[in-house]
Image: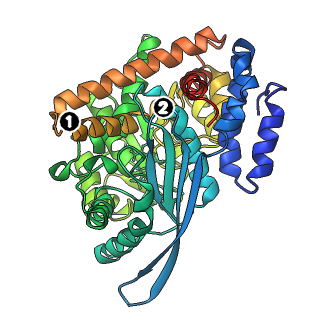
């Protein structure tokens, strides 16, 4: 852990005291607070107005029961969450995660991160996150539909295009969002397109939204490399995960001249020195929803390593795109030792604090999630714009907007780091730039 300003220590202690057992939330809060010492020194009124204390306390937390019936007629009970963290700069915005590991602490860490990420995009969106401990793996389409309908039957009353606008995350993609949007429409009798993002293009969705997080983190990587007078051309890249973010990261890396040699899921990783065959990967993961080992059954030159550590593979670029804390201090040290020069985080908080320290001390280009994966939510905001104007933009137009947003985020983060005496440190730059935008809005809106 790095040093925290002495004025901020008691604030962090209070976060820990009030949110017992929520380790991921403590971790996310600590990382942001560690960056804010120079901000308090420069803007003492933010301290007097207790902006940091206020930002660490969610505006609203909702926990609810989600009962549903499986295909055998058995009753199942899940827990649903929505943490509406901060709405100073716009309606709450952030994804829904369906995974058995979901609990209040995970949702809170994700919602907290989302506040600053959304601010970095420059769009008018506040921060939130939600989800359930429901495990979609192995469930039939009918079971998924019944669960989504029950989940939305409770959540709908808290949503609205001007109030709270969820999207997807782990375990929630186009299929799940479709079932949830259908139920929202049925209950409210309103075709309120702007209430959810990540919708299908035939029913109010935006082109490029499925690709946006992965494309965005690759655009961010491209900017980091450009700042070092380098490029992706010919680079060997390792991407963890094989879900939405990973797949479109791989696609954009190829388009920009890099080669992806490995990807994974929770069962292990696949390695192909000639480059992962993206079409086959999409068929296995997106269409047939199978385990990643199935790729190797169909592409014999590749290798599957059950429960292997993907970060042990030598590469020049690492793009963690699966889940939180998947890359440890040891992994980071090995990556750097084996020649890794850049890391761009598609997943949220994928690197442990020890790993982050290794990357920062090594001087490699390290793009933290808040900045690097902000392209997904930025494109969600573009979807909201299209919904509000009942318009649909072309793929090229939307992708150009996304690319431009990522360039601007990179520039903002880089300049802010420099302004606060931490040149090249994108963690400090992202935390301070995101925080300042929200903090100034909170001051303007008064004590609410
Ligand atoms: P997804 O489509 O559900 O894919 C998740 C991938 O990560 C799968 O390959 C999954 O493997 C793997 N994974 C999940 N939990 C894991 C665990 N505990 N251990 C090992 N592997 C695990 O989800 P996604 O939308 O790509 O999200 C991936 C990451 O990106 C998350 O951190 C999410 O918060 C972040 N993110 C997503 C978006 C977005 O627009 N979707 C935006 C910003 C950030 P299995 O299938 O085996 O579980």
Q: Is residue 9 left or right of residue 305?
A: right
Q: Is residue 266 above or below residue 369?
A: below
Distance (Cα) linking label 2 and label 1: 20 Å
Instruction: Please tell me in which quadrant of the rendered image residue 7 appears.
Output: top right
Quarter of the image for the N terminus: give it: top right
Q: Position of residue 227 (x, y in %)?
A: 45, 12
Q: Report whether 67 appears left or right of 273.
A: right
Q: Residue at x 45, y 20 (%)?
A: 410
The 10 Å Cα crowd at callout 2, few under 14, some 14 to 19, many 20 or more, is many
State how the image is colored: rainbow
Where residue 356 sits: x, y (%)?
A: 64, 33
Q: Which mark is residue 89?
A: 2
Residue reaching furthest bottom? 73
Using the image as rendered, state which of residue 422 and residue 329 is in the foreground: 422
Q: Nearer the viewer, residue 380 or 276?
A: 380
Which quadrant holds the C terminus?
top right
**Residue positioned 50% across, 33% down in the render:** 117
For label 1, the residue is 389
Q: Is residue 344 visible from the viewing direction of this image? A: no
Q: Compare residues 46 and 315 and report the one nearer the observer.
A: 46
The answer to whether residue 236 is left or right of residue 174 is right
Task: Answer with the quarter of the image where residue 86 lies.
Answer: top right
Q: Find residue 289 and report its horizontal and vertical position in percent.
A: 31, 64
Q: Position of residue 114 (x, y in %)?
A: 51, 40
Label 1's element?
A: loop
The image quarter in which residue 249 lies: top left
């Amino acid at each position: 852990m790095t040093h925290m300003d002495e004025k901020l220590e008691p604030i962090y202690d209070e976060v820990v005291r009030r949110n017992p057992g929520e380790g991921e939330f403590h971790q996310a809060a600590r990382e942001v607070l560690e960056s804010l010492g120079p901000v308090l020194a420069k803007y003492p009124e933010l301290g007097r107005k207790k902006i940091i204390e206020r930002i660490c306390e969610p505006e609203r937390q909702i926990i609810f029961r989600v009962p549903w019936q499986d295909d055998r007629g058995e009753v199942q009970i899940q827990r649903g969450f929505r943490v509406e963290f901060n709405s100073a700069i716009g309606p709450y915005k952030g994804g829904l995660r369906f995974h058995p590991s979901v609990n209040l602490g995970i949702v809170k860490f994700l919602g907290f991160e989302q506040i600053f990420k959304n601010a970095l995009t420059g769009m008018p969106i506040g921060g939130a996150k939600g989800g359930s401990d429901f495990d979609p793996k192995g469930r039939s389409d009918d079971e998924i539909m019944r669960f989504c309908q029950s989940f939305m039957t409770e959540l709908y009353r808290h949503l609205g295009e001007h109030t709270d606008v969820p999207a997807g995350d782990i375990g929630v993609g186009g299929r799940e969002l479709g079932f949830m949007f259908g139920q929202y429409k049925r209950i409210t009798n309103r075709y309120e397109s702007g209430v959810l993002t990540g919708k299908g293009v035939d029913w109010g969705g935006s082109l490029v939204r499925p690709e946006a997080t992965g494309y965005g983190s690759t655009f961010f990587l491209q900017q980091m490399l450009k700042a070092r007078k380098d490029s992706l051309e010919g680079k060997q890249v390792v991407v963890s995960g094989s879900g939405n973010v990973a797949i479109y990261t791989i696609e954009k890396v190829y388009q920009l001249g890099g080669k992806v040699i490995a990807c994974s899921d929770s069962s292990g990783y696949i390695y192909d020195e000639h480059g992962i065959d993206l079409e086959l990967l999409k068929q296995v993961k997106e269409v047939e929803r199978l385990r990643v080992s199935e790729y190797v059954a169909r592409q014999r030159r590749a290798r599957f390593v059950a429960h292997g550590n993907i970060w042990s593979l030598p590469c020049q670029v690492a793009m963690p795109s699966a889940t939180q804390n998947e890359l440890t201090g040891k992994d980071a040290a090995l990556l750097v030792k084996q020649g890794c020069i850049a890391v761009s985080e598609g997943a949220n908080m994928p690197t442990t604090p020890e790993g982050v320290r290794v990357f920062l001390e090594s001087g490699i280009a390290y793009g933290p999630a808040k900045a690097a994966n902000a392209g997904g939510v930025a494109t969600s905001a573009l979807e909201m714009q299209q919904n509000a104007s009942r318009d649909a933009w072309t793929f090229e137009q939307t992708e150009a907007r996304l690319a431009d947003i990522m360039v601007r985020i990179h520039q903002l983060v880089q300049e802010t780091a420099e302004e606060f005496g931490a040149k090249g440190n994108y963690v400090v730059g992202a935390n301070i730039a995101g925080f300042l935008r929200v903090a100034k809005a909170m001051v303007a809106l008064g004590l609410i």
